[in-house]
Image (cartoon, rainbow, N blue to C red):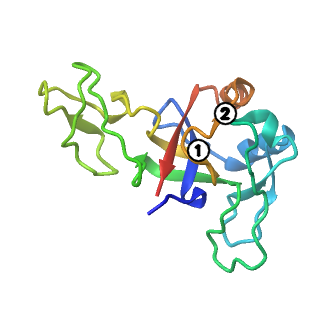
Amino acid sequence: MPQTYGQCSLYLYPEQKDFTAETLSSLISELQEICFLSQPVDRNDEYDFFTGDKFLNHIAYMGCAPAIKFEADPDDEGNDADFCHIKIHRHKTSRLICSQKQSTTPRCPHCKKPVRDWQDDKTAATIKCNQCGTTSNIEDFDWRKMAGYAQLFIEITDIFPKEAIPQKILLDRLTDITNTEWKYFYSCQ
């Protein structure tokens, strides 16, 4: 079955796995100030936003003519409408978010070989390599930009893997706001 864009997202997350914004209001204000995100989407989720006027200055789409939908179709009655918007997720503990539809086999940080039988426990903090027997922190594995492990995520919906990438200006701004480096990955659910 073909993958629809609405099921795929680009995620940004802080390198410091246990980082969580004490108040999301300052992070949201800063992202609104640079016009990355706009007003909240009219839903029950207070951390779901329309893209801002300068969104495309911060996210570069690949290809010659990307079709980007910034508003929901009025005929779409579901809450998971297929259009590009931004969700902020904050969790009490670090968790692994990985692509369910286009999963990748993580590579061991020690032997660099793929670990095929890793557990799919989103709360596990370590993985044992079935190749070399070493147990390592989950964030130390090479997920090849198809997973991330953190407490805070900024999800940009309706982006197929490698269709768009965050620009250095956005990642630098997030680093300035939070005092920690930021990374990104793609996930299809």
Neighbour tally class for label 1: few under 14, some 14-19, many 20 plus, Cα within 10 Å: many
The kind of secondary structure element at disc 1 is strand
Judge by depth and name the residue closer to the eye, 86 or 25: 86
* Three-letter code, disc 2: Pro
Q: Is residue 2 above or below residue 61?
A: below
Question: Residue 114: horizontal and vertical position, in percent?
Answer: 25, 31
Judge by depth and name the residue closer to the eye, 33 or 111: 111
Q: Is residue 150 left or right of residue 178?
A: left
Question: Residue 19: horizontal and vertical position, in percent?
Answer: 52, 37
The residue at which mark 1 appears reads as 10
The residue at which mark 2 appears reads as 166
Judge by depth and name the residue closer to the eye, 183 or 68: 68
The kind of secondary structure element at disc 2 is strand
Quadrant of the image containing the N terminus: bottom left
Q: Is residue 105 left or right of residue 157?
A: left
Q: Is residue 43 above or below residue 48?
A: below
Q: Residue at x 75, y 67 (%)?
A: 72
* Three-letter code, disc 1: Leu
The picture quadrant where one finds residue 100 is: bottom left
> Separation of disc 1 and disc 2 at Cα?
9 Å
Question: Residue 61: horizontal and vertical position, in percent?
Answer: 70, 38
The picture quadrant where one finds residue 165 is: top right
Q: Residue at x 33, y 50 (%)?
A: 123
Neighbour tally class for label 2: few under 14, some 14-19, many 20 plus, Cα within 10 Å: many
Point out which mark residue 128 bears: none
Question: Residue 16: horizontal and vertical position, in percent?
Answer: 49, 30
Q: How many marks?
A: 2
Q: Are marks 1 and 2 in contact (CB under 8 Å)?
A: yes
Of the image marks 1 and 2, the number of the one nearer the N terminus: 1
Q: Residue at x 57, y 37 (%)?
A: 162
